[in-house]
């Protein structure tokens, strides 16, 4: 059974039109992450939450924001998507600092 | 986090053992060695991790050099389902919660 669920698997949006990607988890983990993975590249961390504490990576564009309304859900908001934001977006969770991360299967975002 | 170096790609025959190397010459004493793999069209999946001693689990074995400057992920009998990109990542529990992925090794398994 999927424990980190990302919906939808594929998302298409228009250039400049805001889009929200969602992630839910059934693991009750404290930490949730968002990664961006462009074609043939390794995943790159955008930001993470430790409980309600938000941690932004220094090079994450301002265009990207996140919300975590409760333990189970986390959202990635892209305010004005550009063509360069087309990528796979991966959500991951972790119970604490010593446990492995559990990844969802990602949402592939296309920009028209 | 310290840097890791892996070959870009490797090939293996089905049902043969595979040894995936990783160099991490600047590893610090608090760095754990983590391995994740990413199958096509899926998110990364945890494989194994260790600090100093060799580790075994149901998926793989991790052999860590005595000086900890290199490690090898061992798949004992490769199957077609093991074709994936394998990432070797150093993670210090003093350095926060994030994983920093390097380039990884693309493993191709031939029938």
Image (cartoon, rainbow, N blue to C red):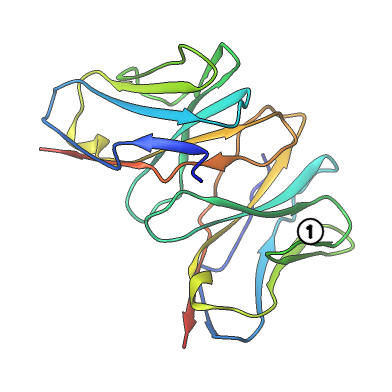
Instruction: Tell me where residue A53 sits by quadrant.
Output: top right
**Image position, residue B7 (x, y; %):** 56, 68
Residue under numbered circle 1 = B69
Image mark count: 1
Q: Relative to B33, does residue A85 appear above or below in the rendering?
A: above
The chain that hosts pointer 1 is B
Residue at 66% x, 82% y is: B17
Residue at 85% over, 43% down: B29
The quarter in which the N terminus of chain B is drawn is top right
Front-lying residue, B60 or B102: B60
Q: As rendered, which of A109 and B31 lies closer to the eye?
A: A109
Side of A58 where B21 appears, left or right? right
Q: Give the image location of residue A63, x and y in percent.
A: 30, 19
Judge the density around disc 1: few (<14), some (14-19), many (≥20) Cα neighbours within 10 Å: some
Q: Where is residue B51 in the image (x, y as percent from the top left)?
A: 83, 50
Q: Quadrant of residue A13?
A: top left
């Amino acid at each position: 059974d999927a424990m980190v669920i990302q919906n939808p698997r594929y998302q298409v949006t228009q250039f400049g039109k805001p889009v929200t990607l969602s992630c839910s988890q059934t693991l009750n983990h404290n930490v949730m992450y968002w990664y961006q993975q462009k074609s043939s590249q390794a995943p790159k961390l955008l930001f993470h939450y430790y409980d309600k504490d938000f941690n932004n990576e220094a090079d994450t564009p301002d265009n990207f924001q996140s919300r975590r309304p409760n333990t189970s859900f986390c959202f990635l908001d892209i305010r004005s998507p550009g063509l360069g934001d087309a990528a796979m977006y991966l959500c991951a969770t972790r119970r604490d600092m010593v446990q492995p991360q559990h990844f969802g299967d990602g949402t592939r975002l296309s920009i028209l | 986090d310290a840097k890791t170096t892996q070959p870009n790609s490797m090939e293996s025959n089905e049902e043969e053992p595979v040894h995936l190397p990783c160099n991490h010459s600047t590893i610090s004493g608090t760095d754990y060695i983590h391995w994740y793999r990413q199958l096509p069209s899926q998110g990364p999946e945890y494989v194994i991790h260790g600090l100093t001693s060799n580790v075994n689990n149901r998926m793989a074995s991790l052999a860590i050099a005595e000086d900890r400057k290199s490690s090898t992920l061992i798949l004992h009998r490769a199957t077609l389902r093991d074709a994936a990109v394998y990432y070797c990542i150093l993670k210090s529990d003093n350095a926060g919660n994030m994983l920093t992925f390097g380039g990884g090794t693309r493993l191709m398994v031939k029938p």
